[in-house]
Image (cartoon, rainbow, N blue to C red):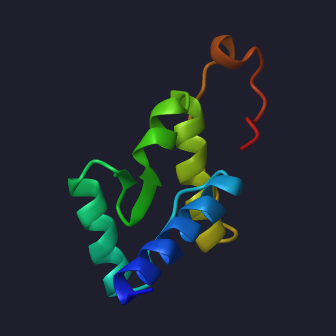
Amino acid sequence: MGRSTTRSAALDEMFDQAERLRQCAQPTSRNETQAMYRRVKAGELIRPAPHLYARASTWKRLPKDERSRWVIRTIARNHPGTSFACTVPPSCTGSPSPIAI
């Protein structure tokens, strides 16, 4: 197995793990960043926020609110203790209570 194949398998595992956690993947090295960028250009991945990536096929299947949750979960994982706030009218949720992510 060549280096390129090994890297590709490692990236695939990174995306499998992120999807199990219902989060976006984040590159941990310059090589991973470059590989993900190439996959974005090829249409395999999307970049919903800076430094966050998801498989295009998975992302397209997610409802819009779940896409937001994936981004929030990923940011929260990397920044424990961060508070996220937004205004959601009670008419959208049925109550003014917090929404679970």
User: Looking at the image, which is closer to me, 10 or 26?
Assistant: 10
Q: Quadrant of the C terminus?
A: top right
Report the side of 39 relative to 79 (left or right): left
Query: Where is residue 66 shown, x and y percent of the image?
Result: 60, 36
- Name which quarter of the figure residue 16 lies in: bottom right
Residue name at image x 61 percent, y 19 percent: 89
Residue 94 to residue 50: above or below: above
Residue 66 to residue 54: above or below: above
Residue 65 to residue 90: above or below: below
Q: Is residue 7 visible?
A: yes
> Which residue ends up furthest to the front in the rendered image?
1
Residue 72 to residue 8: above or below: above
For the image shown, how many numbered marks are present on the structure? Answer: 0
Query: Where is residue 34 shown, x and y percent of the image?
Result: 27, 75
Residue name at image x 34 percent, y 51 percent: 44
Query: Where is residue 92 shown, x and y percent of the image?
Result: 64, 15
> Which residue ends up furthest to the left in the rendered image?
41
Residue name at image x 35 percent, y 81 percent: 4
Q: Is residue 85 visible?
A: no
Q: Quadrant of the N terminus?
A: bottom left
Report the side of 44 relative to 79 (left or right): left
Query: Where is residue 73 shown, x and y percent of the image?
Result: 63, 55
